[in-house]
Image (cartoon, helix red, strand yellow):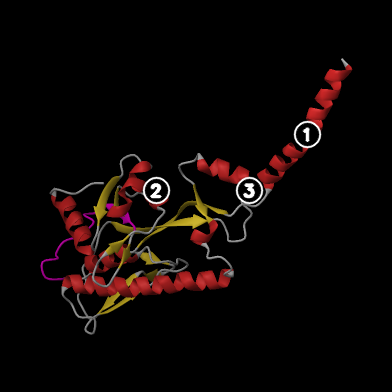
C-alpha cells in the first residue's frame, strides 16, 4: 500500500510542472491576429456626408442598385491572443486566424501601419481612376474624378472604385446600369491597365456582403476556392481577372446572358 501511495505521489509531483506549462501556454500571448467580417460601403452612394465618387467634366448617369466594397477587421496590433482565442476562432466560419506579421509588419508602430494602409488606398484610387477611364476610352486630363472613403485603408477596394466610375460615366457602348438594381459586392486590387489582383480575406468579406444585403459577389479568380468554402446561402460568386471581365459579367447578369461562376 505504501508503495502505491508513493508511486501516485511521485506521478503527481511529475505532472504538476507539465500542467503548469500547459496552463501557461493557454494564457501566453501568441503571434496571431483574429480577423472578422468588417464594414462594407456603397461606392455609388454617400460616405460621411460626401459622395464617394464625384465626376466633373463629363456627363454622368443616375445609377440604381449598389456596388459595395468589403473589408475585414482584425484585432489590434498589441492585442494579446492566447491559445483559447485561437482555438475558438479556428472552429468558427465567421473568424479567421492569421499570422500577426501578415497583417501588421513586425516592429512597426500603429501610426506607421495606419499611414501605410492609407497610402495603399490612395494608390488604389489613382489606379482605379486610370483603369476606368482607360476602359471607357476617356482621357484623364478632360475628366476629373474624386474618390472619398473615410477610415478605410489598403488596396482592396480598387476593383469596386473602377466599376463605380464606369457605372456613373456615360461612355460609348456603355449605356445602362451595371447593377441592374441589385446589391453587388466584391473585392480586388486594380492596376491602371485594369488587371484585378487577389487580396485575401475573401471568405470573411462574402459574409460581410451577405449581412449588408448583397446577392452577387465579384471575386478575384485566384480566390474562388476560398470564397466557395464559406459561401453564404443565396450568394452568387462571379470570378474576375480584369475590369473588362467584371463589366461584361455584370451586363450579362442584367441581360440574362451567360455569367461565369466560381
* Labels in figure, total: 3
Callout 3: 10 Å neighbours few (<14), some, many (20+)? some
- Where does the N terminus fall, quadrant-wise? top right
Residue 65 location in percent, x, y?
27, 56
- Horizontal side of 238 relative to 30 (left or right) equals left
Give the residue at x 41% y 53%.
201
Mark 3 to mark 1 CA distance (whole Å):
25 Å
User: In terms of image quadrants, where is residue 248?
Assistant: bottom left
Residues under labels 2 and 1: Cα distance?
Answer: 45 Å
Observer-nearest of 202 and 163: 202
Q: Are marks 2 and 3 in contact (CB under 8 Å)?
A: no
Which of discs 2 and 3 lies nearer the camera? The answer is 3
- Compare residues 137 and 176 and report the one nearer the observer: 137
Q: Label for residue 203?
A: 2
Which of marks 1 and 3 precedes in the sequence? 1
**Residue 44 visible here:** no
Point out the residue furthest to the right here.
2
Q: Does dot 2 land on a helix, a strand or a loop?
A: helix
Instruction: Mark 2 vs mark 1: give the one in front.
Output: 1
Q: Is residue 9 left or right of residue 230?
A: right
In the rendering, at what x and y percent does residue 21 appear?
72, 42
- In space, the residues marked 2 and 3 are separated at their CA atoms by 23 Å
Please tell me in which quadrant of the rendered image residue 88 appears.
top right
Identify the mark at residue 82; answer none if there is no mark.
Answer: 3
Q: Which residue is mark 1?
A: 14
Q: Is residue 155 visible?
A: yes
Q: Earlier in the sequence, mark 2 or mark 3?
A: 3
Magenta-drawn segment: 171-187
Amino acid at each position: 500500500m505504501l508503495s502505491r501511495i508513493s508511486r501516485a505521489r511521485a506521478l503527481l509531483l511529475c505532472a504538476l510542472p507539465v500542467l503548469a506549462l500547459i496552463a501557461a501556454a493557454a494564457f501566453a500571448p501568441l503571434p496571431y491576429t483574429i480577423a472578422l467580417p468588417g464594414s462594407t460601403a456603397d461606392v455609388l452612394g454617400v460616405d460621411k456626408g460626401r459622395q464617394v465618387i464625384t465626376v466633373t467634366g463629363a456627363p454622368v448617369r443616375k445609377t440604381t442598385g449598389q456596388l459595395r466594397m468589403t473589408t475585414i477587421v482584425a484585432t489590434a496590433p498589441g492585442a494579446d491572443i492566447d491559445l483559447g482565442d485561437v482555438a475558438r476562432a479556428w472552429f468558427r466560419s465567421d473568424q479567421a486566424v492569421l499570422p500577426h506579421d501578415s497583417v501588421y509588419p513586425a516592429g512597426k508602430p500603429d501610426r506607421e501601419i495606419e499611414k501605410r494602409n492609407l497610402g495603399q488606398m490612395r494608390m488604389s484610387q489613382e489606379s482605379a481612376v486610370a483603369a476606368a477611364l482607360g476602359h471607357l476610352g476617356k482621357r484623364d486630363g478632360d475628366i476629373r474624378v474624386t474618390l472619398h472613403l473615410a477610415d478605410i485603408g489598403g488596396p482592396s477596394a480598387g476593383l469596386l472604385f473602377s466599376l463605380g466610375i464606369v457605372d456613373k460615366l456615360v461612355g460609348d457602348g456603355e449605356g445602362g446600369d451595371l447593377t441592374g438594381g441589385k446589391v453587388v459586392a466584391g473585392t480586388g486590387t486594380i492596376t491602371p491597365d485594369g488587371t484585378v489582383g487577389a487580396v485575401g480575406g475573401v471568405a470573411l468579406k462574402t459574409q460581410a456582403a451577405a449581412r449588408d444585403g448583397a446577392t452577387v459577389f465579384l471575386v478575384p479568380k485566384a480566390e474562388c476556392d476560398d470564397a466557395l468554402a464559406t459561401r453564404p446561402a443565396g450568394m452568387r460568386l462571379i470570378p474576375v481577372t480584369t475590369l473588362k471581365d467584371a463589366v461584361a459579367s455584370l451586363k450579362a447578369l442584367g441581360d440574362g446572358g451567360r455569367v461565369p461562376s466560381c
